[in-house]
Image (tube, rainbow, N blue to C red):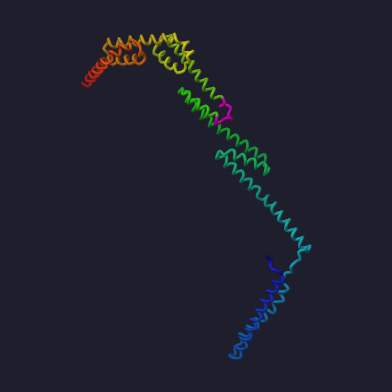
Amino acid sequence: MAESPRKRDGWMVVLYTLLLVAGLVLMAMGILELYQKGDGVLLGLGVLAVMIPAALYPVAAGLRPQAPSAGDPQVLDTLKLISERLLISDAAKGIAYREQDRNALRQAIREDMARSDYDAALVLVEEMASRYGYREEAEQFREEILAARKAEIDAKVDQAMVRLDAILDKRQWDDATAEAAKIMRLYPDVPRVAALAQRVRETQAQYKKDLELRFLKAAERNDIDVAMDLLKEMDLYLSRTEAEELREVARGVVVKKRENLGVQFKLAVHDKEWTESVRIGEQIIKEFPNTRMAGEVRQMIDLLRQRAGSQQAARTTAVTE
C-alpha cells in the first residue's frame, strides 16, 4: 500500500530534527573538549553536523513529489495511456511469438507422426488451421498424415495376408477362418479384407474339387495307392450326398487296394521276405480289419515277426563279418 504524502513529510521532519539534535550534542561536547584540552576538532564536527541538515532540509522539502488528485485530468490521461500501451504490448507479444508457436506446432505434429499417433497429429492440424489460420499448410500436413497412415495400414494388411495364405497352404481351415475374421475386425475400412471369409470358404471348396478330380484320375489310370490316399483325405470333406456319388468308384478302388495288398503279402511270404511280409500284413490289418484276409494275417503275424527278427539278426551278423 502506498505511503500518504503527509506521513512522508512527518518522517522527514523527525529525521532532520534528530540529525540537528545530534549535531548540537556533538557541538556541545566539542566546546567542552576545547576548554578542557584545547582540542577543537570535535567542535568543528559538531558545527558541520548542525549546518548540513539545516541546509539540506529546504532542498529535500522542495524536491518532495506532490500527490496528484484522483480526479485530476492529467492523471486520467496518464492511466489511459498506460492501459493502451499494455494492450498494444500484448498484441505485439502475440505477433512476436507467432512464428515460434507455429514452429512448435509443426514439431509436435512431426513427433506424433513419428510415433504413428495419427489421430493426435490430426487434432494439432485442425488447431493449426482454426486457431492460427494456416489452412494451406494444415491441409498439406493432413494429406501427409493420411498417406502415412494408409501406407502403414497397407503394410500391416500385407503381413496379415501372408500369414493367412500360409495357413491356407497348410489346409488348416478352422485356423484360416479365425485369422480372416481377425483381419476383418482389425481393418474394417480396408476394402480388400471385406471378403476374406468368403475367400477361405472358396479356397476350401476348390481344394475339395481338386481332390475329387485327382482321385477320379488316379482310379482311372489304376493308380490304386494314390487313389486310396486321396480317398482317405476326401473323407474329411465329403458330405453324405457327395460320398454317395463316388461310392462305386471308391468301392472299386478299395477292392483293388485290398486285392493288391493280398497279392503283395503272398509274394513276400513266398519269397521269405519276412520283414516285408510283416509290414504288408500290418497294413492289411489296419486298413481292412474286418475282412477274412485280415483274420488270416492275424493268425500268421506273430510267426512272421519272429522270422523277420531272426532274418534281420542274420543279415546284421553277415555284414559285420
Figure quadrant of the C terminus: top left
Residue 283 belongs to the span the image colors magenta:
no
Figure quadrant of the N terminus: bottom right
Residue 294 placement (x, y as % from top left): 33, 12
User: Could you say which quadrant of the image residue 317 lies in?
Assistant: top left
Q: How many marks?
A: 0
Q: Nearer the viewer, residue 315 or 18?
A: 18
**Could you tell me which residue is drawn at 71 percent across and 69 percent down?**
4
Residue 101 placement (x, y as % from top left): 63, 47
Q: In the rendered image of this protein, does residue 131 appear above or below residue 216?
A: below
111 displayed left or right of 226: right
**Could you tell me which residue is drawn at 51 percent across and 20 percent down?**
203
76 displayed left or right of 51: right
Question: Farthest left residue?
Answer: 321
Residue 127 placement (x, y as % from top left): 65, 42
Q: Nearer the viewer, residue 54 or 313?
A: 313
Does the image show residue 78? yes
Tell me the magenta residue range: 185-194
Q: Nearer the viewer, residue 165 or 284?
A: 284
Residue 291 placement (x, y as % from top left): 35, 11
Does the image show residue 44? no
Question: Farthest front residue?
Answer: 290
Q: In the rendered image of this protein, does residue 258 appear above or below residue 9?
A: above
User: Could you say which quadrant of the image residue 102 lies in?
Assistant: top right
